């Protein structure tokens, strides 16, 4: 019903920057909150940042001041600008969207994940 496709991951040196994108498509009436989560190797998935339809944001303490989440409601896309990357930021990053479908159901959708590797 709803597909999320992430892009922008890769390998970067510590101190560098990456920008992740996630585009949603399918049976979408409106996307409520969108966000990014990550799962480091051997650890559980954790919240990175979220953004509401109106643009209110929330960040994990570990990324505040370094990462910026934004979205385009017209394009059903969410972005994550990651600056001053640290080795501990290395993880698979997942996009999430809380979607009201055209059938008036509310569902949670996840992307397939994109790898971010930070070399020290």
Image (cartoon, rainbow, N blue to C red):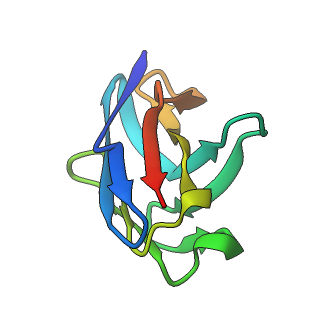
| Residue appearing at x 47%, y 24% in the figure | 112
Q: Residue furthest left?
A: 75
Q: Is residue 79 visible?
A: no
Residue projecting furthest to the front: 120
| Res 73 → quadrant | bottom left
- Residue 80's x, y, as percent? 39, 59
- The quadrant where residue 54 appears: bottom left
Q: Nearer the viewer, residue 74 or 94?
A: 94
Q: Is residue 33 above or below residue 45?
A: below
Q: Position of residue 81 (x, y in %)?
A: 35, 65
Residue at 44 percent across and 60 percent down: it is 53
Nearer to me, 91 or 27: 91
Q: Is residue 83 visible?
A: yes
Residue 30 image offset from top left, x and y in percent: 40, 43
Q: Residue at x 67, y 68 (%)?
A: 60
Q: Is residue 6 left or right of residue 54?
A: left
Q: Position of residue 64 (x, y in %)?
A: 58, 79
Q: Reply above or below: 107 against 76.
A: above
Residue furthest to the bottom in view is 65
The number of numbered discs placed on residues in the rendered structure image is 0
Q: Identify the residue at horizontal 45%, vertical 54% (top origin).
A: 119
Q: Quadrant of the N terminus?
A: top left
Q: Is residue 95 left or right of residue 24?
A: right
Whether 95 is drawn above or below 68: the answer is above
């Amino acid at each position: 019903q709803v597909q999320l496709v992430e892009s922008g991951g890769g390998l970067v040196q510590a101190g560098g920057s990456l920008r992740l994108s996630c585009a949603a498509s399918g049976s979408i009436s409106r996307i409520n909150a969108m966000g990014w989560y990550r799962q480091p190797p051997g650890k559980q998935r954790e919240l990175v940042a979220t953004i509401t339809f109106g643009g209110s944001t929330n960040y994990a303490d570990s990324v505040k001041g370094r990462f910026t989440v934004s979205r385009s409601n017209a394009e059903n896309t969410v972005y994550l600008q990651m600056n001053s990357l640290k080795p501990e930021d290395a993880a698979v990053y997942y996009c999430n969207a809380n979607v009201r479908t055209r059938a008036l159901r509310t569902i949670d959708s996840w992307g397939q994940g994109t790898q971010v590797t930070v070399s020290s």
